[in-house]
Image (cartoon, rainbow, N blue to C red):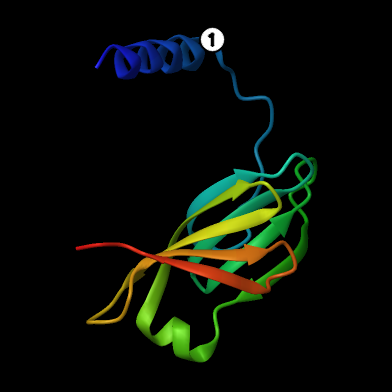
Amino acid sequence: MKTIMALLCTVMVTAHAAKIVQTLNAPANKVTGLAFDGQNLWASSQEPDSLYKLNPLTGAVVGSWKNSAEEAATRNITGVGFAGNSIYVGMDAQSAVRAGIYRYTTAGEYKHFCHFLT
């Protein structure tokens, strides 16, 4: 509990000290997450069900990929994160298919799936 409280205090102090230095146009409707890999900004979107690689200075789309037709029919992208050399994409499930975290390379190659327990 003490660790969580310390983290919350740090976030609150940082939020008050922060200021907006730049705004960028969203690459699509319904952007559900943003991540930074040290060089590029990544945006996930539910409409269309895609992931976008953006130039963080200009907001220009420099790469993107869309879920396959099979995935798009059964899952929605809910967020994105970056760690190591991988992009982690959260997807919910519509009906009985698996929801979870999908790991991709920065080129869009599928690597691994982690199932959410419900």
Quarter holding the C terminus is bottom left
31 in relation to 19, above or below: below
Q: Secondary structure at mark 1?
A: helix
Q: Quadrant of residue 110?
A: bottom right
Q: Amino acid at mark 1?
A: Ala
Q: Is residue 18 left or right of residue 55?
A: left
Residue drawn at point x = 51 percent, y = 90 percent: 69
Q: Nearer the viewer, residue 91 or 59?
A: 91
- Residue position marked by numbered label 1 in the rendering: 17
Q: Nearer the viewer, residue 85 or 36?
A: 85
Q: Position of residue 12 (x, y in %)?
A: 40, 14
- Graded by Cα atoms within 10 Å as few (under 14), some (14 to 19) or many (20 or more), the crowding at tag 1 reads few
Pick out the residue farthest to the bottom: 70
Q: Is residue 63 left or right of residue 97?
A: right
Q: Nearer the viewer, residue 92 or 58?
A: 92
Q: Quadrant of residue 76?
A: bottom left
Residue drawn at point x = 52 percent, y = 74 percent: 48
Quarter holding the N terminus is top left
Q: Position of residue 55 (x, y in %)?
A: 79, 49
Q: Position of residue 67 (x, y in %)?
A: 55, 79
Residue drawn at point x = 54 percent, y = 9 percent: 17
Q: Position of residue 58 (x, y in %)?
A: 79, 45
Q: Is residue 55 left or right of residue 109?
A: right
